[in-house]
Image (tube, helix red, strand yellow):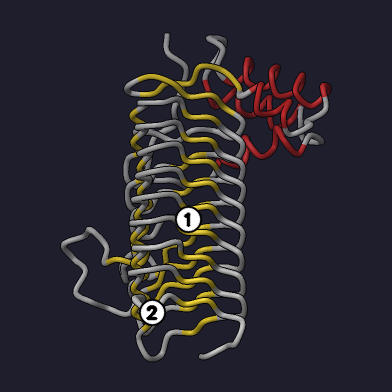
Amino acid sequence: MADARMSIHPTAIIEAGAELGADVEIGSFCHVSAGARLHDGVVLKNHVVISGATEIGARTIVHPFAALGGAPQHLGYKGEDTKLIIGADNIIREHATMNLGTVAGGGVTRVGARGFFMIGVHVAHDCKIGDNVIFANNAAVAGHVEVGDGVFIGALCGVHQQCRIGSFSYVGGCAAVVSDVIPYASAIGNHAGLAGLNIIGLKRRGIPRAVIHDLRNAYKMLFSDVDTFKERYGRVREQYSDCPEVMRIVDFIGSDAPRSLMTPRR
């Protein structure tokens, strides 16, 4: 679709069928596939490759040599019509890669809004990434990973297939994550283990002191050495039923998931 307000460099290749919104800017030597859709105000700096059925939300900025919508790194993928859907107002830096979904994984890789994906970040097939996340340089999440809202993943971190990273948690640099991280937690090490709550992140987001106090107490109860985990879990569920933040952790733990739960190191 042509629009007088677009700015498209003459060296860019826009395949017939690509949908471009108003005020889109496409720099030199970019390639946009026929199945792509760029919403209003999207900026592709230069040397950006948008492949397959990739949708990019409004005002997202993509820096040089990023490759979005490439085929899944999965031997079972046979060229099926799958998608990558990226939300609005993201910043995607150089050499970042985000892949299409697979049929077996639901067919869609989803990335939320207002994320900051630094140099060399990788988001694999069928991932579900929340809003307001930060992935530092070369952080990589494997297939079917779920990352909640407000998560910070440190540089050179690797997350195993099918892991869940709970909302507003922090994963330290160079961590190898092979189990589920509860919401609001701080996970560090290789392999990563729970190191407490993400107190700095909670304060930065304006979480009230009383709520942080409840989260601290619930965390201590859950991971103490008293009684069984099932019993401690039940007490937390009952005692903090009126605290949505604690119940976010309770619901996270109680849901059916393919990976084990990350716990503190003993």
Q: Residue at x 33, y 69 (%)?
A: 29
State the count of labels.
Answer: 2
CA neighbours of label 2 inside 10 A, class few (<14), some (14 to 19), many (20+) = few
Q: At numbered mark 2, what does the secondary structure look like: helix, strand or loop?
A: loop
CA neighbours of label 1 inside 10 A, class few (<14), some (14 to 19), many (20+) = many
Rendering quarter of residue 41 = bottom right
The single residue placed furthest to the front in the displayed view is 10
Q: Residue at x 57, y 63 (%)?
A: 87
Rendered view: 38 above or below 170? below
**Is there a contact, CB below 8 Å, between mark 2 and mark 1?**
no
The single residue placed furthest to the left in the displayed view is 75
Q: At numbered mark 1, what does the secondary structure look like: helix, strand or loop?
A: strand
The x and y percentages for residue 60 are 56, 61
Residue nearest the observer in this picture, 49 or 97:
49
Q: What residue does disc 2 label?
A: 10
Quarter of the figure that contains the C terminus: top left
The x and y percentages for residue 243 are 78, 34
Residue nearest the observer in this picture, 33 or 153:
33
Please name the amino acid that badge 2 sits on: Pro
Q: What residue does disc 1 label?
A: 128
The x and y percentages for residue 198 are 61, 24
